[in-house]
Amino acid sequence: MVAAVTSLRKLSFCALVLLAAISACVTTPEPVELIVPEPMGPKWSYEGKTGPKHWGDLSAAWIVAKEGKEQSPVDLAETRSSSVLYPLNFSYRSAPLNLVNNGHTIQQNIAPGSSIEVMGKVYSLKQFHFHSASEHTIDGRQLDLEMHLVHQAPDGQLLVVGILFEIGAENPFLAQFFGQLPTTAHESLAVSGFTLNPTEALPEDRSYYYYQGSLTTPPCTEGVQWYILRQPMQLSQGQLTAFRALYANNFRPVQPLNQRTIWETQ
């Protein structure tokens, strides 16, 4: 009887995950280039009249930022654990250094070849970027830095892996390029012969939190799959200072959960 109930719970959870995936695919996401937009459309920022509280009023196309029910980021609390969540299969390759200061963050654009596979579906890694302080919080605690690895499947579905950082030892991955961040908005930096492998940014523990959410910058499109790795990484105070000298407090505050479930791997 216990085995039957356990099997039924696993089947119910798998059905829930499948339903969430199908529902996400119904939403037509914005092109991946708009995840951290270049200077286009209305001016937006992280403070004042163009800050997060007003994003939904700046453009009719951004109304979901105000009226959406599955917005990101969220506080990672009141989670439900499960032993049947699918593993994240990373397949990242070294890519040329291609940093861009886009006016809102520092972004590394990734050459084709890196991907992640989840539930048998492959998503290509398009770019990664940073927010300080962290956008997602854990039981109300905000960490020092958050890295978003942004992926997109051939059907347009978006998947973002989040890595949280806290002050501690110098981070070897960040040390490769945090000393030469482009300091001017819309400035880019490419170094011939120098490459980065995003695999080096990942923690050893690949357990995660999972939920359905949105982009955290305008247009705040919903239908995004979020996987936040549970193990925080460390960075030095000097590394954090280097980033915050360019972008301090470039984070969107946590949004209402609105009955969504946050799943956590056991």
Image (spheres, rainbow, N blue to C red):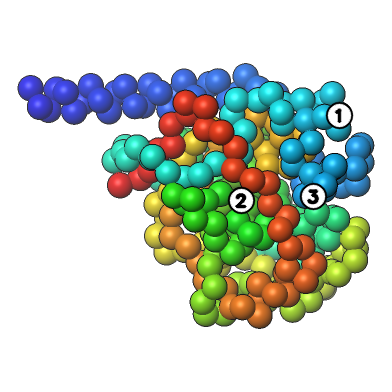
Kindly identify which residue carries mark 3: 47
Q: Secondary structure at mark 2?
A: loop
Q: Nearer the viewer, residue 170 or 93?
A: 170
Can residue 90 be seen here? The reply is no
3 or 2: mark nearer the eye: 3
Q: Secondary structure at mark 1?
A: loop
Percent of width and height locating residue 90: 51, 52
Question: Disc 3 marks which amino acid?
Answer: Glu
Q: Nearer the viewer, residue 150 or 145?
A: 145
Kindly identify which residue carries mark 2: 135
Mark 2 to mark 1 CA distance (whole Å): 23 Å
Question: Disc 2 marks which amino acid?
Answer: Glu
Mark 3 to mark 2 CA distance (whole Å): 15 Å
Kindly identify which residue carries mark 1: 59
Circles 2 and 1: CB atoms closer than 8 Å? no
- For the point 85% across and 55% down, the residue is 102
Percent of width and height locating residue 14: 36, 26
Percent of width and height locating residue 106: 76, 61
